[in-house]
Amino acid sequence: MLREEGRTYRFRGTWRAGRSNWRLQVLSIFSLAVAFVCLASALLVVSNLAAVRDRWSRAGRATVYLRDGATEADVKALVKALEATAGVERVRYVSRDVARNEVLEGSGDTELAALPPEAFPSSIELSLTDGIGDMELNMMALKLRALPSVDTVDTYQKWTERLSSLLHGAVTASLLLALVVLGAVISVVASTMRLLLERRRPEVEVLRLVGATTRFVCRPFVVEGAVQGALGAAAAVFGVGALYGIVRSRFDQQLATLLGISPSFLPLPMILGMVAAGAALGAAAAWLSIRKTVQI
């Protein structure tokens, strides 16, 4: 019986407080949403950078640039040897003319069009299997660079390293933003709960006089804090999603082809984690902010 009455009090108390102080609740949720927008935006950038890094780390390709003095016989012998190499899936020879046409295709750059074919190096493009590792790729590139007909070999690992460095910086920034969001949630929820407590102090004092425990009195405020935190995080996800939709609609498809991926929104587990974290932080902040006040 007492448990049922306690549940009824918590439900009615929470509903009554939310209905009578809806402006304060909306302002609190809006403030929390602004804080969570920063965190959601940072997580969105981090997740897309991680996708680009993973895509380039397993790009499965390399380019062998040939010297100007490489003869046709040297090129044919090199292509034949590469086709018989383990881990090489496809070999494509790109002559100077083909390289020039591919660069000029769709660019409309008159300065590039004025360059002679000799300005574009001939190359051999390699498509590699997924089973080849970084060590095997580095060994292959080292052997190819030693050949007299090869100028250089590009395995695109420098791009992966740069993206990894950029991703590390983005993760660090996200952690700092998470601390800022944590402080904002605690401050906003704590202030809101104190204001609600002051408005409902006569009711709280009556409950204390009839023997209500601190936990019993605080639970409606804790529920309100959890709801505020969850709604603030959900509103932030919705707002960032709307901005993402605008950016995605104007995203250059050629850039997506160059990167190898298209931008994607936050995965569902991350979204649910943000909402759950908002609810947990809101509940904890509410409990810590009013526990001592109720005990006085």
Image: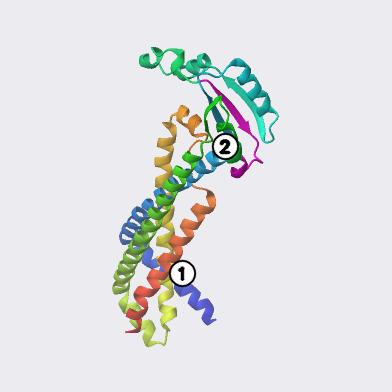
**The N terminus, quarter of image:** bottom right
Residue at which label 1 appears: 11
In front of the other: 47 or 269: 47
Mark 1 crowd level (few <14, some 14–19, many ≥20, 10 Å Cα):
some
Residue at disc 1, secondary structure: helix
**The C terminus, quarter of image:** bottom left
Residue at which label 2 appears: 142
Instruction: Note whether 247 is above or below 167 in the view shown.
Output: above
- Magenta region: which residues? 122-136
In front of the other: 259 or 115: 115
The kind of residue on which mark 1 rests is Phe
The kind of residue on which mark 2 rests is Leu
Q: Marks 2 and 1: in contact by CB < 8 Å?
A: no
Instruction: Note whether 198 is above or below 131 in the view shown.
Output: below
Instruction: Note whether 23 is above or below 218 in the view shown.
Output: above
> Looking at the picture, how far across and down is residue 227, in whole percent?
43, 62
Residue at disc 2, secondary structure: helix
> Looking at the picture, how far across and down is residue 197, in whole percent?
32, 73
Q: Is residue 36 left or right of residue 7?
A: left
